[in-house]
Image (cartoon, coloured by chain):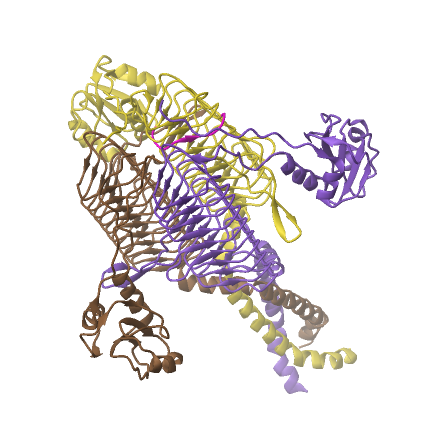
Chain colours: A yellow, B brown, C purple
Amino acid sequence: MPHRPPRRIEHRPPVLRADAIAAFLEAPLVGDAGREIRGPAALDHAREDQVSFVSDGKYAAAAAQSRAGLLLVQEGLNVEAASAAIVRVPEARIAFQRVLGLFFPSCDRLEPGIHETAAVAEDASVHPTATVGPHCTIESGASIGAGAVLRSHVFVGQGSSVGADGYIYPHVSIRGGVSIGARCLLHSGVVIGSDGFGFVRVGDRHEKVAQIGGVRIGDDVEIGANSCIDRGALGDTVIGSGTKIDNLVHIAHNVQIGRNVLLIAQVGLSGSVTIGDDAVLAGQAAVAGHLHVGRGAQIGGRSGVMENIPEGLRVFGFPARNLRDFIRLQRSIEDLPELARKLQGLEAEVARLRQEQRPIDADAPADRTAD
Amino acid sequence: MPHRPPRRIEHRPPVLRADAIAAFLEAPLVGDAGREIRGPAALDHAREDQVSFVSDGKYAAAAAQSRAGLLLVQEGLNVEAASAAIVRVPEARIAFQRVLGLFFPSCDRLEPGIHETAAVAEDASVHPTATVGPHCTIESGASIGAGAVLRSHVFVGQGSSVGADGYIYPHVSIRGGVSIGARCLLHSGVVIGSDGFGFVRVGDRHEKVAQIGGVRIGDDVEIGANSCIDRGALGDTVIGSGTKIDNLVHIAHNVQIGRNVLLIAQVGLSGSVTIGDDAVLAGQAAVAGHLHVGRGAQIGGRSGVMENIPEGLRVFGFPARNLRDFIRLQRSIEDLPELARKLQGLEAEVARLRQEQRPIDADAPADRTAD
Amino acid sequence: MPHRPPRRIEHRPPVLRADAIAAFLEAPLVGDAGREIRGPAALDHAREDQVSFVSDGKYAAAAAQSRAGLLLVQEGLNVEAASAAIVRVPEARIAFQRVLGLFFPSCDRLEPGIHETAAVAEDASVHPTATVGPHCTIESGASIGAGAVLRSHVFVGQGSSVGADGYIYPHVSIRGGVSIGARCLLHSGVVIGSDGFGFVRVGDRHEKVAQIGGVRIGDDVEIGANSCIDRGALGDTVIGSGTKIDNLVHIAHNVQIGRNVLLIAQVGLSGSVTIGDDAVLAGQAAVAGHLHVGRGAQIGGRSGVMENIPEGLRVFGFPARNLRDFIRLQRSIEDLPELARKLQGLEAEVARLRQEQRPIDADAPADRTAD
């Protein structure tokens, strides 16, 4: 057994004062500001050095009996807590989730260094505080920033860079010509910089169009398992800072994504699509080539965007239309069988009217000539 | 060439008596019960020690001439077979497929042992009968059960376990905190235990919500190529025993899947979805967050589930509705152009009625006053 | 740092005469046929030894001032170019993209040889001009053709073959029983030969159906990142020569794809589907099991094919129907709220007619008896 993967650096959760947690949540504290908190717990199990939360009035009795040292209580709840300290927050569950992150790091830290099984080019640059795990390949001219972790089986191609404190899970492929900012988190199986899908029909075959652009990814970007981001054809495919991408997402060549965008699982973006800051695309949604989704727009799950979407608009369906129109149309569709029935009834009624009117009509000329 | 992958252990297909095959199929045998069968073959090529099948009357002539030692004949077919033994079964094609499995193992067996290129932590536990192939990484505290095979490039993270007789194809990532039961089959590129997609909007950025749960997978689960199963946020994501998952499926955090569920290719399950035993979700179907799909429910291909689905219901479409309603609605939609035409005709007819009635109306008061 | 990945072989872009480029484009040249061209450039930056293009009249002024040695000018444009040579082409942008490919190779070439970290079976065959990069595994009986490149972390299973000049990016899994033709390009994370999704319900569980077929891939096939092609159940899954497949595509067992087919991202093909030559399936489209898509048919994005598609037909929607019917139906759906409003108006009108007619009707019999 000649090789050993690097050890995890033991993580000791921090001890935080109650007022530090309140400050992190930007919320007012009542009670023992100096109470030391060592971790989170459920309301009925929490100890004097733990934090818990109350998000609903139905937990009032449990809150009254909880021994938690710090309670995060939803604003507006009439809760008498026995805890030493209380922080009132607008969304107690979310506040608790945020506090969890203070105690549990999102990624294991590993001993720095290059594993003996890794293959690293002579002229690649690996920061001394970075970890390059087993079976990684780092090609010529690539650079790995301070504190970055390549967990295992990571490929970094010619001249590409992983920024400081990046965390790259196993089996990620970063091809050449890719730059990744600081603190990015890439989950297993992510592929960055694969060729865009570009062909020209020449005679009876498809001729490949050179894909010679790259990929630029900002800071604090997270990319979910087995998602793919193609390189640009000529320029770069760009992912803005703070953008978060879920699993199995497809991003084609030349796509430009703004900051803090959310792309939920299995979304597909066609070539040259642009997405404004803060937009959200829900699961399995897709955008056709060269279209623009405006800043802050929200695209519903499974929607298919077939035209530009203005800033801030919420759209749904295929083809995607604004939510109000979608709901109205959807109701019309639901009512279709009823509408067909009504039409049938009306046809019968009109036929009867015609039937009944006919004799009168027949007489009418006579009547009229009689006038 | 310093390294060699492990050799395959030569598989010699078993010799099975005709009555053993009949017993496996739980079907009655007629003829030579002791006939030794060494493998399957097509009807017209089968030898005296081979098994074949007849699923349709059109093969009656071929069956009469077949030299097969054993024939699986569809019940109700009037077939005179020349074969030494006959087993009558309700579904001959399916029975034959099942018998194939007796002769051909679903996975190659490899020499046990740890390949010299693998990186295995000192305190990981690898059963002596397990195979750890080239370029595998097994981290601290992980355990690999008896007879399990990690084919090549498999990553098993901190403290995770692969049960007895598991078979893990190349490039599978099993992150820390994952337990996998016995006899599970994971195809290439599967990712288990990636972070769920959880963020809280804080000011102008998305703050990551800690994903500190794990994944628990039962026995006899099969997972298709490049499918992803996220870890739970707090608790575990759970996949029940006997469940089979196809390629490129996305399973989000906290999802709970029952036993013997089928998820066909490219299905997407949002966070905290629960799926009852024996449910079937066809290709590209999706379920929105926190919904429940009842036991034995069947979700049609490309359907989008937007509300809870009761036990046993068959649904289709987007939003998914029960199959009868879907078909009725679909017909209404198909009839729409016809309906629009009818409406137009009716409008014209009513306009004519109005036109024709007007003179009468005009006279009517006179007539009436004349009464 | 004991291992080094193989070096890239320096690529020196060729020097091409203007008439050679014209000949490649099969288009007429005017001007300096012998002008030496060393690369492409944008219209306003091009030097005397570079080629650029004019695809629109709005660039006429720029073209008149461009110093480019060779200009590709869209046919029909009235452009006075100052360049030494001009080639007139039907599609200048596409012609330029094609010329790019003459100067930039689509893949890096690496030093041939087997990397010291690779694990290669004794009886595998690797051509001396092939490159087997770091952390590759090549199992028993596999063969790697002349000039082929396995970049890094590539798995080639028992007896499978990669044809001459194939280029396989990192983390590709080629299971046993797969043959890949010449000049194929497989992007990272591709899985070829995973088991098809085949089960038989036996009592209360799903019994696996043996998947003992293989996969046959022709020449000049490109397969996008993280796409999956399952092996056949009994026979082979087949991908015809010249077919191009985008990212995250699912191809189930026994699928038969013709030549020069295009499958765009996230397409899903169910088991035993057959696709004729030159067909195009746009993004996220799907085809239900055992159906046939005819030669040259075009399936729109997100369409769901539920019946056989004749040769050359363009279809759209779910269920997919021919484009004209789809557009007509789509318009009818858009008009639905209007149609419902019209129906309501008509109901009111008919009610009024009835109301007005009633007195007449009441009198009518009297009138008639009076006749």
Q: Is residue A73 above or below residue A333?
A: above
The answer to whether residue C30 is left or right of residue B266 is right
The answer to whether residue C46 is left or right of residue B71 is right
Instruction: Report the magenta stretch's main SS.
Output: loop
Check if residue B107 falls in the magenta segment. no
Q: Is residue B30 above or below residue C232?
A: below
Q: Residue at x 29, y 71 (%)?
A: B51
Figure quadrant of the C terminus of chain B: bottom right
> Measured from the top left, where is residue A250 in percent x and y?
48, 40
Image label count = 0
The answer, for residue C40, to whether it is visible in the render is no
The answer, for residue B227, to whether it is visible in the render is yes
Quarter occupied by residue A128: top left
> Measured from the top left, where is residue A70 in percent x and y?
22, 21
Check if residue A153 falls in the magenta segment. yes
Q: Is residue A5 above or below residue C174?
A: above
Quarter occupied by residue A75: top left
The answer to whether residue B21 is left or right of residue C327 is left
The residue lying toward the viewer, choosing from B296 and B37, is B37
The answer to whether residue B283 is left or right of residue C201 is right
Quarter occupied by residue C70: top right
The residue lying toward the viewer, choosing from B123 and A252, is B123
> Measured from the top left, where is residue C189 in percent x and y?
42, 41
The residue lying toward the viewer, choosing from C156 and B89, is C156
Q: Residue furthest top?
A: A34
Figure quadrant of the N terminus of chain B: top left
The residue lying toward the viewer, choosing from A333 and C306, is C306
**Range of magenta residues:** A151-159
> Measured from the top left, where is residue B106 in percent x and y?
29, 55
